[in-house]
Image (tube, rainbow, N blue to C red):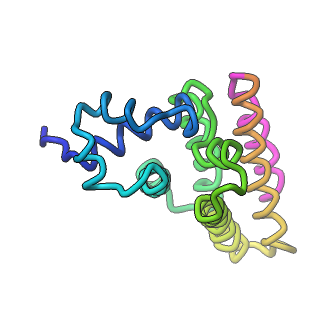
Amino acid sequence: MKKEKVRERIIRVASDLFYKQGYNSTGINQIIAEADIAIGSLYNHFSSKNDLLQAYLVKEEFDWFEGFENSTSKISDPKEKLLALIDYRKKLQQTSKFAGCHFIKIVSEIGEGNPSISAFTRQHKEKQKDLIRTLVIEYGSKIQLDDPDFIAENIFLLIEGAVVTSTINRQNDSFDQVKKIVQGLLP
């Protein structure tokens, strides 16, 4: 196993803390202590806690899309890929013990107080929606779908709602319901 670089370790430790206890509840000193680094090491890599937050979200976005790609790489049918996306989100909820979406959590915590973070989060959700739209359009090219954008928007909203519902209820039934609805939307 290759040795973890200091920058990667800082991001990993900060990511875990931001996700588990919240951005505002995580102090620089706690990150330094848990990453087992000197304060200078942190500031050599990040000029502020906000820079570290940005790096955390960039890493989460990369991991999210890479995880989706890896979990669906053997699926070519767009409808099956959409259904696999629902399974992927369900798996993320289970592995996080129903802790919810990294991006929703950050925005709900910082609100509009940090415009660059809010914008990045909106762009991340738009990328997810674009992924869904691309798959719906691909599927729709085989059959005549009336309004692929409307269908994609609804699938996106259903999945996001399932994430929130499963976080609140601490169970994944909502994803199974979403899958049934999506199968009905895509004949």
Kindly give the residue lying farthest to the right in the view shown.
146
Q: Measuring from the top left, give residue 19's x and y in whole percent.
A: 53, 35
Q: Using the rendered view, name the quadrant where residue 120 is placed.
A: bottom right
Reply above or below: 170 against 163. Answer: above
Residue drawn 48% across the image and 56% down it: 54
Quarter occupied by the N terminus: top left
Say if the magenta span includes residue 176.
yes
- Left-right relation of 25 to 109: left
Kindly give the residue lying farthest to the left in the view shown.
2
Reply above or below: 20 against 121. Answer: above
Residue drawn 72% across the image and 47% down it: 159
Residue drawn 69% across the image and 28% down it: 172
Judge by depth and name the residue closer to the eye, 4 or 52. Answer: 52
Count every numbered label the image shows and give the total.
0
Residue drawn 62% across the image and 27% down it: 98
Q: Measuring from the top left, give residue 31's x and y in whole percent.
A: 37, 35
Q: Measuring from the top left, give residue 175's x and y in whole percent.
A: 71, 37
Instruction: Give the extent of the magenta segment.
Output: 170-187
Q: Measuring from the top left, give residue 124's x and y in whole percent.
A: 59, 61
Q: Magenta segment, principal secondary structure? A: helix
Say if the magenta span includes residue 186.
yes
Q: Using the rendered view, name the quadrant where residue 134 is placed.
A: bottom right
